[in-house]
Image: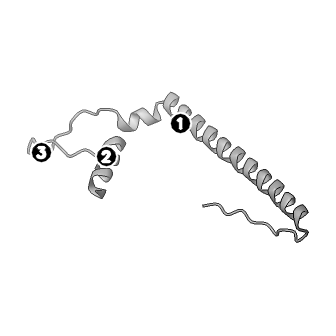
């Protein structure tokens, strides 16, 4: 949580207007920062998708077998891991 604070003036009406202007400036700056973070996250995910790294993690893999002929357990995909965490939390 981001807390934005400032020292308010003590000139009555002028102070209230000044405080409102500061609030507006801080709100606008926060909005711009959030939009920038969203754009950066989107671009990073798009690069990963184009590079194939994201798909490689969750791609199907051939089964591997131990010396007894039983399949070796494979790690869950990221999607299955998230779903498992959601189900176990409830």
For the point 11% across and 43% down, which residue is it?
70
Check disc 2 and report its element: helix, strand or loop.
Answer: helix
Q: Nearer the viewer, mark 3 or mark 2?
A: 2
CA gap between label 2 and label 1 equals 20 Å
For the point 40% across and 34% down, which residue is it?
56
Q: Quadrant of residue 14?
A: bottom right
Spot the residue most to the left: 68
Q: Which residue is mark 1?
A: 45
Q: Which residue is mark 2?
A: 83
| In the image: residue 1, left or right of residue 70 | right
For the point 27% across and 51% down, which residue is it?
87
Q: Earlier in the sequence, mark 1 or mark 3?
A: 1
Q: Nearer the viewer, mark 2 or mark 1?
A: 2
Coordinates of residue 55 in the picture (x, y in percent): 41, 32
Q: Is residue 84 above or below residue 56?
A: below
CA gap between label 1 and label 3 equals 40 Å
Q: Earlier in the sequence, mark 2 or mark 1?
A: 1
Coordinates of residue 48 in the picture (x, y in percent): 51, 35
For the point 29% across and 32% down, which residue is it?
60
Camera-nearest residue between 21 and 33:
21
CA gap between label 3 and label 2 equals 32 Å
Camera-nearest residue between 14 and 40:
14
Q: Which residue is mark 3?
A: 67
Spot the residue most to the top: 50
């Amino acid at each position: 949580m981001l807390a934005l604070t400032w020292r308010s003036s003590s000139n009555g009406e002028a102070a209230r207007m000044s405080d409102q202007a500061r609030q507006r400036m801080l709100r606008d700056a926060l909005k711009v920062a959030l939009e920038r973070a969203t754009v950066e996250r989107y671009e990073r995910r798009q690069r990963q998708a184009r590079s194939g790294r994201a798909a490689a993690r969750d791609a199907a893999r051939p089964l591997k077998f131990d010396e007894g002929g039983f399949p070796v357990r494979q790690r869950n995909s990221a999607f299955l891991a998230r779903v498992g965490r959601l189900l176990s939390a409830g």
